[in-house]
């Protein structure tokens, strides 16, 4: 069990991926930034997906920077560094896709 979260383009290809084990509370950071806590099913995602506009993904990235800064220097340890980096990269890759295609799908498994 765990949280496997995928960004998916219109062709159905994986363009972003974030993985959190079932005990990793940092998964909720990504759920919250994407305003998708309803897809958080405890030890994993709900198995559902949602489509996000470019504006929604831009807001998630802006919120990330406001909370965590431009780097992961604000984190407490290397475990948090890794999670913050994967969250940033996930949102950034989803943003690049949504800018090209108008939207991006995210699957919460």
Image (tube, rainbow, N blue to C red):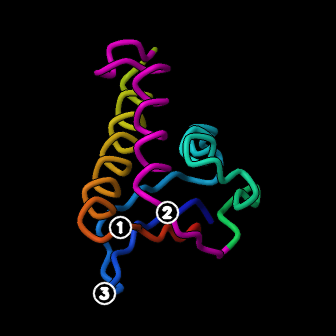
Residue at image x 71%, y 56%?
A: 40
Q: Position of residue 3 (x, y in %)?
A: 57, 60
- 41 vs 1, left or right, is right
List the residue tagged with mark 3. 11
Residue at image x 41%, y 68%?
A: 104
List the residue tagged with mark 2. 5
Q: Where 52 sits versus 87, above or below?
A: below
Of discs 1 and 3, which sits in the foreground? 1
Of discs 1 and 2, which sits in the foreground? 1
* Quadrant housing the N terminus: bottom right
List the residue tagged with mark 1. 102
Q: Are marks 1 and 3 in contact (CB under 8 Å)?
A: no
Q: Where 101 sits versus 36, above or below?
A: below
CA separation, marks 2 and 3?
A: 17 Å
Q: Does the magenta portion include 69?
A: yes
Under tag 1, what secondary structure? loop
- Labels 2 and 3: the sequence-earlier one: 2
Q: Position of residue 83 (x, y in %)?
A: 42, 38
Under tag 3, what secondary structure? loop
- For the record, the magenta segment spans 47-75
Q: Residues within 10 Å of mark 1 (few under 14, many from 20)?
A: some
Q: Position of residue 64 (x, y in %)?
A: 45, 30
Residue at image x 66%, y 54%?
A: 36
């Amino acid at each position: 069990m765990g949280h496997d979260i995928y960004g998916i383009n219109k062709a159905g290809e994986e363009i972003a991926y974030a993985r959190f084990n079932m005990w990793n509370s940092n998964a909720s950071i990504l759920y919250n930034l994407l305003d998708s806590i309803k897809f958080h099913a405890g030890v994993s995602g709900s198995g559902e997906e949602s489509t996000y506009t470019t504006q929604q993904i831009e807001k998630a990235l802006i919120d990330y920077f406001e909370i965590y800064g431009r780097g992961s220097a604000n984190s407490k340890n290397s475990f948090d560094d890794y999670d913050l980096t994967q969250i940033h990269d996930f949102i950034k890759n989803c943003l690049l896709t949504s800018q090209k295609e108008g939207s991006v799908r995210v699957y919460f498994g």
